[in-house]
Image: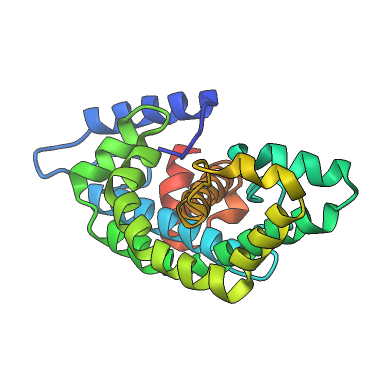
């Protein structure tokens, strides 16, 4: 169920669910030591996903949320790697650093838009969706969120990124950076990347990564289970 989780823990969880499913009666109630029902399992899963997504939004949407986190920091686009290398060779590191900083600041400002979209996807989750996540492959939750939120998130976040790039000075930083390469600027002709689309994509990648980490934490650490129902659902697994 957990995003980007490739550990044996998920296999154990799947075995547990198979056991629970085998104990369900025709009313859809699981007979376990803690009398855990399908409704409780689904609601507990929703609470865990809500906690994970809100954590990601809060962490990445604050000042330095991207720039100060090496796991999600947005780097120079690959197509501009030679520009960065040239600037640093010429001793103009500040131009490359300015551009990277403004890109990450734009991402931070776009992140809060994701909270509502994630919330809607979680609340609209059906019993079948939940069971598919719980009993699916290692990346079942990632697939669920990407298939149900990625397109809408991209559509809703890109205009915010575009406004943020203007506000944080990404465009001017880009111009300063490329101007700093002097005669090499002509090499950019016809290959200028779509910076707004790049920032949007990397912002979403960062969100999904942070959600994955928080959800694995909920799975492994009982202290991270912040509600009574989450404790009951995951306690039954323990």
Left-right relation of 138 to 186:
left
Near-viewer residue (33 or 43): 43
**Residue visible at 10% across and 45% down in the picture:** 27
Q: Residue 224: x percent and y percent?
A: 58, 55
Q: How many marks?
A: 0
Q: Residue furthest bottom?
A: 167
Near-viewer residue (205 or 40): 205
Which quadrant does the N terminus fall into?
top left
Q: Residue 61: x percent and y percent?
A: 57, 67
Q: Residue furthest right?
A: 91
**Residue visible at 64% across and 67% down in the picture:** 172
Q: Is residue 146 above or below residue 169?
A: above
Q: Is residue 166 above or below residue 5?
A: below
Near-viewer residue (135 or 115): 115
Q: Quadrant of residue 165?
A: bottom right
Q: Residue 29: x percent and y percent?
A: 20, 44
Left-right relation of 92 to 161:
right
**Residue visible at 67% across and 47% down in the picture:** 185
């Amino acid at each position: 169920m957990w995003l980007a989780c490739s550990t044996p823990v998920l296999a154990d969880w799947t075995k547990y669910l198979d056991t629970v499913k085998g104990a369900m009666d025709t009313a859809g109630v699981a007979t376990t030591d803690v009398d855990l029902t399908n409704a409780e399992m689904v609601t507990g899963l929703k609470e865990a996903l809500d906690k994970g997504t809100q954590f990601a939004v809060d962490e990445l949407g604050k000042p330095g949320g991207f720039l100060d986190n090496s796991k999600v920091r947005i780097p120079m686009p690959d197509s501009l790697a030679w520009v960065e290398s040239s600037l640093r060779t010429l001793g103009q590191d500040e131009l490359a650093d300015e551009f990277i900083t403004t890109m990450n600041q734009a991402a931070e400002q776009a992140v809060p838009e994701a909270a509502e979209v994630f919330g809607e996807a979680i609340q609209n989750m059906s019993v079948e969706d939940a069971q598919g996540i719980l009993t699916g492959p290692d990346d079942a939750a990632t697939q669920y969120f990407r298939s149900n939120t990625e397109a809408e998130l991209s559509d809703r976040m890109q205009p915010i990124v575009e406004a943020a790039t203007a506000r944080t000075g990404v465009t001017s930083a880009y111009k300063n950076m490329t101007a700093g390469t002097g005669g090499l600027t002509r090499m950019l002709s016809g290959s200028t990347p779509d910076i707004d689309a790049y920032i949007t994509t990397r912002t979403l990648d960062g969100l999904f990564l942070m959600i994955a980490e928080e959800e694995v934490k909920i799975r492994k650490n009982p202290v991270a289970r912040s509600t009574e129902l989450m404790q009951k659902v995951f306690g039954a697994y323990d």
